[in-house]
Amino acid sequence: MAKISQVSSKYIIHTTIEIEGIVDKPDVIGAIFGQTEGLLGADLELRELQRSGRIGRIEVNLEIKSGKTTGSIIIPSSLDKAETSIIGAALEVIQKIGPCTAKIKVQNIEDVRVSKRKFVIDRAKDLLKAMMDNVIPDSQELADEVAYSVRVMEIQEYGTDRLPAGPSIDESDEIIIVEGRADVLNMLKHGFKNVIAVNGTSAPKSIVDLCQRKTSTLFVDGDRGGDLIIKEITGVAEIDYVTKAPDGKELEEITKKEIHKALRGRIAVEQAKLEIKENNGGLKSEKPKTQLGQKPRFSPRRSEQTRRPEPSRQVKISAEEKKTFKDMLEDLIGTRGAYVLDTKLNILGKVPITELQTTIKSLKSGVHAIVFDGTIDRGLIKVAERTAVKYIVAMDSKIKPSDTRITVLTSNDL
């Protein structure tokens, strides 16, 4: 006998059955075929429909309790809606099964295609969500991932101690000393290439030698371990400045903004030792607030910096120019780069500060202002005066405003 499954059917007739007595499944199936025979005509004869595969296998589920039988009848159909409905209605004419009174009630006729369609929609939503979450990163995510991979590849081993370090340790005049490899990786991720790790609590010979030749900042975790490293390293190496990650955080996990904030709030090593002594061996992670955009000045150590900042110079400058210079200076923090601007404060170009004087000389005219991540010195002033530059904006300056006709601005002035 040909049969169809619920999978290939279009509709499923769901019915309930209540019998005043005890019967078996064959009794129910026999009653269905026997009592509907001849009722609907030759075209809708159940035996013929099942033989041709248009009605599937009739499933009967029974439960006997307290002398009564209850259960359900399920009939799959590949007929059309009207014919399936007629078959369902025909089942309700059955009033006896064997010697027992019976009552059959059609609960519903399920459209299998609707159920499948709902499943397809729900599953498609899940698949689309998975694609958006895991499979299709946007262009910015791709760029960030590539940039991070490149920076991670830049990590190298420095000196006989084979210390984890960034690629700019040798050529940079300033270095940042951190605790371990993970700290170096996080700093590289955020664009700091002049970083080297001590790989422990004692200062290796490579670190001691570097500190004698370069301006150094010790950057440690914001916990008790960081305080111990400060005491240990500053006791044997010629450290210039000290700073810590936010309280309770490790350097390897903090963000770029937190790194810049910590570096802007660094203090001279003499002040760090004093604070550690005053705070029973611990250095506070919370540093005094600095002006927005004020970058740590990696310049030769000056003990007077530990006392009070130099008073801001009062310079006549429009609010619009001040905001533009301030934003640009913040943008350049940590890049060791310079912006060359025209009279409308448009950026003519960005160059490394090592090429700044050469660039100004080659332009000869048309340069209205210079903004750069560094310190203004006499050599730059001379070149800028020949080119009729009006403003020079930098992190710090070795030139007094009265020594030049150019308006000199530092982060303190902004």
Image (cartoon, grey):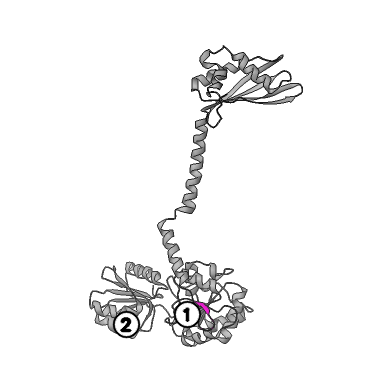
Which disc, if any, is residue 205?
none
Quadrant for the N terminus in the image: top right
Residue picked out by circle 1: 175
Q: Is residue 307 visible?
A: no
Callout 1: 10 Å neighbours few (<14), some, many (20+)? many
Specify the amino acid type for callout 1.
Ile
What percent of the width, then of the height, locates residue 278? Answer: 61, 80
Circle 2 is placed at which residue position?
A: 380
Visible in this render: residue 224? yes
Residue 20 coordinates in the image, percent (x, y): 72, 18
Q: Mark 2 packing: few (<14 Cα in 10 Å), some, or many (20+)?
A: some
- The tally of labels here is 2
- Please tell me whether mark 1 sits on a helix, a strand or a loop: strand
Foreground pick, 248 / 202: 202
Q: Is residue 98 above or below residue 179?
A: above
Q: Are marks 2 and 1 in contact (CB under 8 Å)?
A: no
Query: Residue at coordinates 40% horizontally, 75% vertically from top-left?
Result: 411
Quarter of the rendering occupied by the C terminus: bottom left
Viewer-nearest residue: 22 or 292: 22
Quadrant of the rendered structure where residue 275 is? Answer: bottom right
- Measure the C-alpha gap from mark 2 to mark 1: 24 Å
Q: Nearer the viewer, residue 39 or 113?
A: 39
184 in magenta: no
Q: What residue range appears in magenta?
A: 159-165
